Amino acid sequence: METKLLRGEQERDLQEAARLLRAGETVAFPTETVYGLGANALDADAARKIYAAKGRPSDNPLIVHIYDRAQLEMLTDQISETAEKLMDAFWPGPLTIIFHRRPGAVPDCVTGGLDTVAVRMPNHPVALRLLRMADLPIAAPSANLSGKPSPTAVSHVEHDLSGRIAAIVSGGSCAVGVESTVLDVSGNAPVILRPGGITREQLEAVTSEPVIYATPHGSTVETPRAPGMKYTHYAPEAPVYICTGTPEEIAEKIDHRLEVHKGRAGVMLSRQTLRLLQNADENLVVNLGSRDDLKQIACNLFAALRYFDDSDVEAIYTEDFPAEHIGVALMNRLDKAAGSKKI
Ligand code: AMP
Ligand code: MG
């Protein structure tokens, strides 16, 4: 299949992307979190093309993207007061809400057969314009091959999916750079199934009741409630190791590892920790940003993981960050990339 490259700032290109979506094809497009791979959420055949292109396990449900609250009525007939408040506060934005699914509203393959449906309104002008033109709820997981780091630039999508999907809409780099927070409000207390772009503290400021994590901070223990969380995620080709301790201890450990690997190791670290390294080869170093700005570090993480796939490093070393606020999402992704390997 030839994959068309369409420009998100061109009206005519967006019209073509909308036409393809309406014709049951798959189209990747930018959002503020990561690039998504979209297809008509009401059409089982279209949604199945997403799983095929990504190599995604069929029991890992998709997030349905909408541009307008009126579209939500199609998907669910149960909108709680808490959900209303959260949508008012965070939509459009990086919050996915799990609702009871309106019977028969979306095909089973979109929800992995669950009686709930995950919905989000993305905060990106190109995504919103495209969703409005297509005028359909669009199922869209991250636009990467299953198991690879999520794409935060159009080049990442091309690398993984060229030849496998109908089109890619360009739209610059993603401003948030980690996926949405997935929040289940279908039970009693709101539960974070996946930490993401909106923090627990931000949610609690709106719900005025405690919001709980389905799994402990940074843990990769699986929750059956977010089926996708059990699969390998964010894995670059080389193994990733998270170094713990003070910045000085981390730098010492990494300097030692660099000697052992005779330079064939990559490091991705905060600016502060990088400064303490003695042995690093500039070409195999990624500066993730300041430790004082975990948002920036989270935003740079996926591109950093992909950077090393173009080199022949044997291992990638990184550091532990505080699992607080956006750091919870950051450490969740990093832990999965590392398969929890710590030194
Ligand atoms: P992705 O779109 O690749 O970022 O992954 C979507 C995430 O949302 C996965 O972790 C899914 O398991 C989760 N998800 C989607 N739909 C549901 C649902 N109905 N209930 C619980 N989790 C869901
Ligand atoms: Mg994904």
Image (cartoon, rainbow, N blue to C red):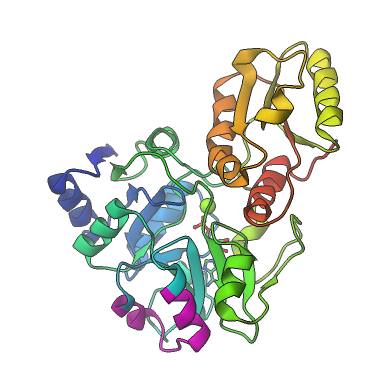
Q: Residue at x 37, y 42 (%)?
A: 164
Q: Residue at x 41, y 54 (%)?
A: 50
The image quarter in which residue 338 lies: top right
Write down the region rendered in magenta.
70-88
Q: Is residue 100 visible?
A: no
* Residue 335 percent location from the top left of the image: 72, 46
Q: Quadrant of ligand 1?
A: bottom right
In this view, which residue lies farthest toward the front?
292
**The N terminus, quarter of image:** top left
Q: Main secondary structure of the magenta part?
A: helix
* Residue 30 percent location from the top left of the image: 36, 48
**The C terminus, quarter of image:** top right
* Residue 46 percent location from the top left of the image: 33, 60
Left or right, 267 with reference to 105? right
Above or below residue 69? Residue 182 is above
Is residue 179 on the magenta stretch?
no
